[in-house]
Image (cartoon, rainbow, N blue to C red):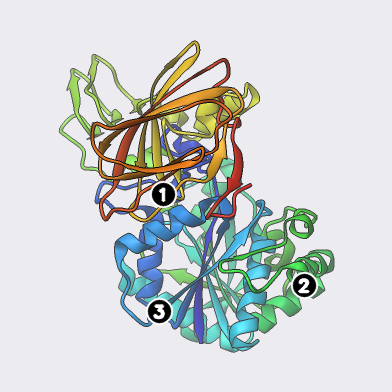
Amino acid sequence: MLIPVILSGGAGTRLWPVSREAHPKPFIVLPDGQSLMQKTLLRAAALNPASILTITNRDYFFITRDAYAEVGLAKGITLDYLLEPVGRNTAPAIAAGALRIREQFGDAATMLVLPSDHLIADVAAFESAVRAAEKLAEEGYLVTFGIAPAGAETGFGYIEADQSRQLSGGGLAVRRFIEKPAREKAEEYLAAGGYYWNSGMFCFRVGEFLAELARSAPEVSQAVAAAWEATPHGQVPLVIDPEAFARIADISVDYAVMEKAERVAVVPGRFDWSDIGSWQALGELLPADSDGNRVQGEVMLVDSRNCFVQSEDRLVAALGVQNLLIVDTPDALLVADRSRAQDVKTVVQRLKAEGHESARLHRTVHRPWGTYTVLEEGPRFKIKRIVVKPGASLSLQYHHRRSEHWVVVSGTARIVNGEREIDLHADQSSYIPAGTAHRLANPGEVACVMIEVQSGDYLGEDDIVRLEDNYGRK
């Protein structure tokens, strides 16, 4: 039995300002209208598994669930979730997933580990590689997927295959794993042949993987087992015990297991593959004009060449420039030389060091109940547009230092305001003084849209005391 396991945890800092901590790379919508995460789900579902397990941070559960619901999978596939309280890299995540699958399907079940942020268009060739890997896994191998290098790439790890050891289904024995190399080494590997990019996709039986983890990284194996034992298994979705999981070492599955195991195979992937690791890679999904420019959104280029420009909601014009990345969002603008696409993450590091909110949040912030967008703010005031999904509700809460005035734009708002509960419709409003318990819910069948005006001497998002919450937030 093959169980796809989708790993979703990376921040995608090289795709800032569109990818941010609270809404990272897997949820970026590509030019065709689907996100990387949705494409990964559909690719996994095309294998016709009985179940698909998604391992992600608990903060991303609701947005993941909503993204999956948009694509409408065929009936018969169970969507299971395992939520991490904190990120601990791929080895602990995969180990916890293995324990979950063993609990449901036994040691003989085969895991197909898929990062959520890869792009593969040739699904038929991908499925062929998976079936070859599945056969090798049944023979007791830990299998990885290698991508034939398209150039001397320094942003990927490499796998050296033993060309003299042909295995079932066109697989090869792995000689060694290599960290991201310097340019000269990458060029050597490309010239020599027999080297593959490490895709970060894996296939192995649950029993073999857990046994190899216990042998190669016993401290990780024991710590994950302890966290699993401490996890209340009656939850839906299942959230791993926070205290025990936080004590596990932050380590990749390559370091912990794959580089140390003896029976490791690589299946060369004869399919297109990209990890969309930079704006350069994402820009290649768009057609180029006669001057080599690639654009998305409302863009005007005059006497400009070899530029990538993306605009979300306003016109971006560029005159007499070349080799630029320009990415415009409502609250942040990135301008960079195209040769520095891999270095965008250093901007995010600086923003985090300075405590700048744009490293974490967009102007439009996703919540389990819907979204809010900061329209304007200044001394002692903030204006938001709030959209509440049908049947959803915010927490019952109060604020110490701000009051709020709610005006309904469309839909129906059911409001708890102190001791009163009232339904409001378009053009109706309610005032909530500081310190008053309140709640906003949408009892209707269409989205409720409203404008919130906050006033007070402190308007930070952390001035929320939740009394009741439908989503398990404190």
Q: Secondary structure at mark 3?
A: loop
The numbered mark, 2 or 1, whose residue comes first in the sequence reads: 1
Q: Secondary structure at mark 1?
A: helix
The CA distance from mark 2 to mark 1 is 32 Å
| Residue on which disc 1 sits | 27
Disc assigned to residue 77: 3
The numbered mark, 3 or 2, whose residue comes first in the sequence reads: 3
Disc assigned to residue 229: 2
The numbered mark, 3 or 1, whose residue comes first in the sequence reads: 1
Q: Residue at x 57, y 35 (%)?
A: 398
* Quadrant assignment, res 354: top right
Relative side of 193 to 279, left or right = right
Front-most of 332 and 472? 472
Q: Residue at x 41, y 30 (%)?
A: 363
Relative side of 242 to 420, left or right = right
Q: Residue at x 50, y 82 (%)?
A: 2
* Quadrant assignment, res 220: bottom right
Q: Amino acid at mark 2?
A: Glu
